[in-house]
């Protein structure tokens, strides 16, 4: 079995994205913050925080009591080295070490499609959110409504792993007891990242080779079908079914 390649841990990707390992950097974080108007000192969690770039931004630029959680010891280590004292926790998105109803918002940036049990994770995030608390998700999606693709272990593990269509995303949110307030397409941010990767490496094929994965030129945009979205949802009433 070939070793699993985690695109988000690759220095070749981070050399292009910088500390935020996603299309658009902090653009959609800022857009969501403007939409949600969280009070200063509100407790928020960045699930799948990577090296904690969003956590540092939320704390230092927005005065929020932000925490980060991620499964990757490697990325958390990079974050801890870069910024002393950031509250970064090693853990799984599916089991948050937070009490019920204690968070004003959860951010989840370029992570949901990587989570192996997304419905269970959404239920867990709902548990930790305060009533009417916000869930901010940005991620890849299939713009043609295509079916979810989950590669076998050993395949390239990137944001492409569990990409699904918007209808399925809405269904998942409703089933988990969230009300979707906002869904915006931000595919140009994904295209810009792809262009930056090609600029840095000569072609997408050369980039995937540098990363050690097995994708070719069509992998990131899948013939133009992959898109990028921002969703803001809110924890709904307690009687969801
Ligand atoms: C594409 S990176 C995005 C990191 C960060 N949100 C950012 O935008 O810079 C995906 C992150 O999700 C984390 N991740 C994936 N599945 C996870 C899980 N089940 N629990 C916790 N973290 C997870 C990875 O370790 C990685 O840091």
Image (cartoon, rainbow, N blue to C red):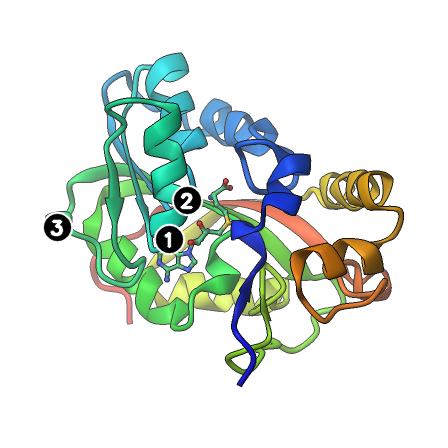
Q: Is mark 2 within 8 Å of ligand 1?
A: yes
Q: Tag 3 or tag 1, which sits nearer the N-term? A: 1
Q: Residues within 10 Å of mark 1 (few under 14, many from 20)?
A: some
Q: Residue at x 70, y 74 (%)?
A: 146
Can you tell me whether the CB of the residue at mark 1 lies under 8 Å from the nearest atom of ligand 1? Answer: yes
Q: Nearer the viewer, mark 2 or mark 3?
A: 2
Is residue 48 in view from this perspective?
Answer: no
Q: Earlier in the sequence, mark 2 or mark 3?
A: 2
Callout 3: SS:
loop
Q: Nearer the viewer, residue 219 or 187?
A: 219
Residue beneath disc 1? 72
Distance from the alpha carbon under mark 1 to that under mark 3: 24 Å
- The residue labelled by disc 2 is 75
Question: Which quarter of the figure has residue 209?
Answer: bottom right
Vertical placement of residue 102 versus 128, above or below: above
For label 2, the crowd category at 10 Å Cα-Cα, with few meaning under 14, some 14 to 19 and many 20 or more, is many
Say which quadrant the C terminus sits in: bottom left
Is 72 or 221 nearer to us in this picture? 72
* C-alpha gap between disc 2 and disc 3: 27 Å
Rendering quarter of residue 174: bottom left
Judging by the rendered image, the residue that carries numbered circle 3 is 100
Count neighbours of disc 3 (C-alpha within 10 A) and say few if under 14, some if 14 to 19, many if 20 or more.
some
Q: Are marks 2 and 1 in contact (CB under 8 Å)?
A: yes
Q: Residue 195, percent across and down?
A: 83, 42
């Amino acid at each position: 079995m070939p070793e699993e390649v985690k695109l988000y841990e690759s220095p070749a990707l981070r050399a292009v994205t910088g500390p935020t390992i996603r299309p658009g950097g902090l653009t959609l974080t800022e857009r969501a913050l403007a939409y949600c108007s969280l009070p200063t000192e509100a407790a928020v969690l960045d699930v799948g925080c990577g090296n904690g770039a969003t956590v540092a931004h939320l704390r230092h630029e927005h005065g929020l009591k932000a925490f980060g959680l991620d499964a990757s010891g490697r990325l958390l280590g990079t974050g801890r080295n870069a910024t002393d004292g950031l509250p970064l926790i090693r853990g799984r998105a599916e089991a948050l070490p937070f009490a019920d109803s204690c968070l004003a918002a959860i951010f989840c940036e370029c992570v949901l499609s990587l989570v192996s049990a997304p419905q269970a994770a959404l239920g867990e995030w709902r548990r930790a959110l305060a009533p009417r608390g916000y869930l901010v998700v940005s991620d890849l999606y299939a713009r043609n409504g295509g079916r979810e693709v989950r590669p076998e272990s050993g395949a390239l593990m990137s944001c492409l792993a569990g990409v699904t269509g918007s209808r399925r995303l809405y269904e998942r949110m409703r089933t988990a007891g969230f009300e979707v307030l906002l869904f915006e397409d931000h595919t140009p941010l994904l295209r810009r990242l792809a262009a930056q990767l090609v600029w840095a490496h000569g072609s997408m094929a050369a980039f995937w080779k540098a990363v050690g994965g097995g994708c070719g030129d069509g992998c990131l945009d899948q013939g133009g079908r992959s898109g990028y979205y921002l969703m803001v949802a809110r924890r709904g009433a307690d009687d969801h079914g």
